[in-house]
Image (spheres, rainbow, N blue to C red):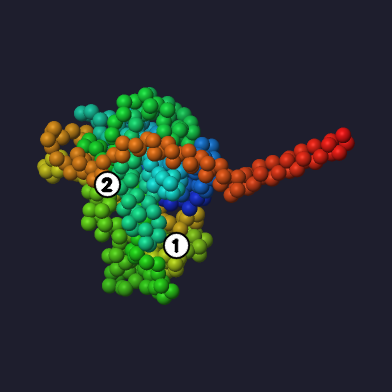
Amino acid sequence: MASTSSLDVLIVTFNCGRAPVRPGLLARHLADAFPDSQSPDIIVLSLQEIAPIAYSFLGGSYLLPYLGGFRHAIDLAGKSFGEARYTTIVTRNVGMTACMVFVHEEQKDKIQRVETGAVGVGVQEMGNKGAVGVRLGYSVPEGITELTFVAAHLAPMENGLARRNEDWMNIVRGLVFPTVHSKAVHDRAEHPTANAESEPLLPNDAAATPERANGIYTPTSHLILAGDLNYRTSSTIPRPSDHLAFPQPTTSPADPHHYSHLLRHDQLAREREAGRTCHALREAPVDFPPTYKYSGKAQARAGTKTATGGAGAEEEKEWAWAKHRWPSWCDRILFLDLPARMTMSGNVEMGVQRYTALPLMPTSDHRPVVLRLQVPLMAIPAPEDDGDEGVRTRPPFPVDPRWRERRAAARRKEVVVGVLAYLFCTWEGMGILLALLVGALGGWAVVRRVMLEL
């Protein structure tokens, strides 16, 4: 729970591998990562590849079996956090990427405002890759502090560096927050199953709200980015013998197989330093192994006593990597520091409690990553009219004035692709096609017989 001076926020990012999560196992890993810990005030899940493309693009009830598993996992994890209970404040997805926000039952009345936004950066701007944003207005003694959470999934592959940077630019330009009225916040808290899986991609009440160019960077909001950012440790695929040098469990940085040697080639660190991505965002020190790509062998033994070493797990003697991909820290969580005018006194700062990777889940070749962050319980005041606070007042890219039109066009394409994928790539859809075919053949037989009898 929050202290008198900070808000305890737990952020989790996980590439789900298009498969339902095992709630009990995820809850156990979360509990093991924070033993004897107080309950967080807010839990945020950034989820990528939440379900097969047909269900993800159609949304609604098709996603309930997938997102419902995470709701169950949080319920179970809450029991290990001092029997804490959490309310689902919002669930929102764009295609295959979703963001779920849970607030401690005792803190839910402090949520005064919720805004959501989404942008697709995949094929034809659809949501096979993209970002979802949730902005909360949290009540503090001197007003409201804003918390902006962005769940993202960027372009894949070792040679996709330029595309990843372009995806980030399009997220900054296209992820805009139309306001959701405060009444809707409490309606969602009372009816969590009716919130965002059935919520339109562009909320109906957004049209009644005065338009604002309100992107992810604003002067008065905290910003936390979490997702499968897909930055790799090489720009080319491994050669046949390169897997022999892949990281393996060792506690000695002098060992050539220690993961720190590969971390030096991390694309995200290099691109951030060069000012080409994740502008002004900070990351806690990475002191955990690569989070991707684990082999099928590793997934098969995940959840057993020999599970991949990590928070709360027994260390294994070998990390089983897929040989055709460089092990990389694809899954990351970054945040924007407080304005300099608030930190000059040295008494206020964003406090990192822990940043680590959880053990591998049997349903994914990615390891989940968690960040426990202490956010100062105070409003960020707006700067003076002529104040320059870097990206807060001068975002790296301007908001696209056509963001709504482009998202609506992409959504129409998603529906078409979702229907086609459902009909041709799922057992239910193929059953419908077969029934239609049988019905058509039967109808033709009846018509033909009647014609012959005339």
Give residue 442's position: percent from left, percent from top: 77, 41
Q: N-terminal of the two: label 1 or label 2? A: 1
Quarter of the figure with the C terminus? top right
Pick out the residue farthest to the front: 454
Looking at the rendered structure, the number of numbered marks drawn on it comes to 2
Residue 343 - label: none
Quarter of the figure with the N terminus? top left
Q: Which residue does the image show at 23% across and 42% down from the upper left? A: 395
Name the amino acid, label 1.
Tyr
Where disc 2 sits, the SS reads strand
Residue position for label 1: 294
Of residue 217 and residue 294, the one placed in the foreground of this image is 217
Q: Which residue does the image show at 59% across and 49% down from the upper left? A: 425
Query: Would residue 437 be visible to someone looking at this image?
Result: yes
Query: Would residue 372 be visible to someone looking at this image?
Result: no
Of residue 5 and residue 422, the one placed in the foreground of this image is 422
Name the amino acid, label 2.
Phe
Residue position for label 2: 335
Give residue 427's position: percent from left, percent from top: 63, 47
Where disc 1 sits, the SS reads loop
In the displayed structure, would residue 178 be above or below residue 57?
above
Q: Which residue does the image show at 43% across and 38% down from the upper left? A: 409
The reply to whether the C-beta atoms of the residues labelled 1 and 2 are less than 8 Å apart is no
